[in-house]
């Protein structure tokens, strides 16, 4: 292992987990899957916009890979 802190910092993998914003299904108190997901509620859209602003502000490390589910609520987030 290297004693160089800069080199050690480059070897660290950072995992950022983000849950989708509030969904229409949550508001309606329903379960939703691939065929029945109706996307984000107005609050969910606001939550996703706040996340986007946070990431765009440049205070987070760059993101190399994004993995998401195919559900509408996840894709909208």
Image (spheres, rainbow, N blue to C red):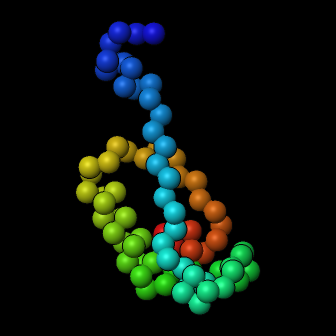
**Residue 33 at what x, y percent from top left?**
71, 76
Residue visible at 61% across and 86% down in the picture? 29
Residue visible at 68% across and 79% down in the picture? 32
**Residue 14 at what x, y percent from top left?**
45, 39
Tally of marks: 0
When asked about the image quadrant of residue 43, the answer is bottom left
Asked if residue 9 shows in the view, the reply is yes
Residue 19 or 66: which is nearer the viewer?
19
Reply above or below: 15 against 46: above
Reply above or below: 18 against 3: below
Reply above or below: 49 against 64: below
**Residue 54 at what x, y percent from top left?**
31, 60
Residue visible at 45% across and 78% down in the picture? 44
When asked about the image quadrant of residue 48, the answer is bottom left
Left or right of residue 77, residue 35 in this image: right
Residue visible at 37% across and 25% down in the picture? 9
Quarter of the figure with the N terminus:
top left
- Determine the residue located farthest toward the bottom in the rendered image: 28
Reply above or below: 33 against 25: above
**Residue 37 at what x, y percent from top left?**
65, 80
- Determine the residue located farthest toward the front in the rendered image: 29
Left or right of residue 77, residue 7 in this image: left
Asked if residue 38 shows in the view, the reply is no
């Amino acid at each position: 292992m290297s004693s160089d802190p800069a080199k050690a910092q480059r070897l660290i993998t950072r995992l950022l987990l983000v849950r989708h914003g509030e969904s229409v299904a949550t508001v309606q108190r329903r379960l939703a899957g691939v065929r029945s997901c109706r996307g984000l509620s107005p609050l969910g859209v606001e939550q996703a916009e706040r996340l986007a602003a946070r990431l765009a502000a440049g205070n987070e490390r760059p993101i190399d890979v994004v993995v998401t589910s195919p559900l509408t609520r996840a894709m909208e987030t």
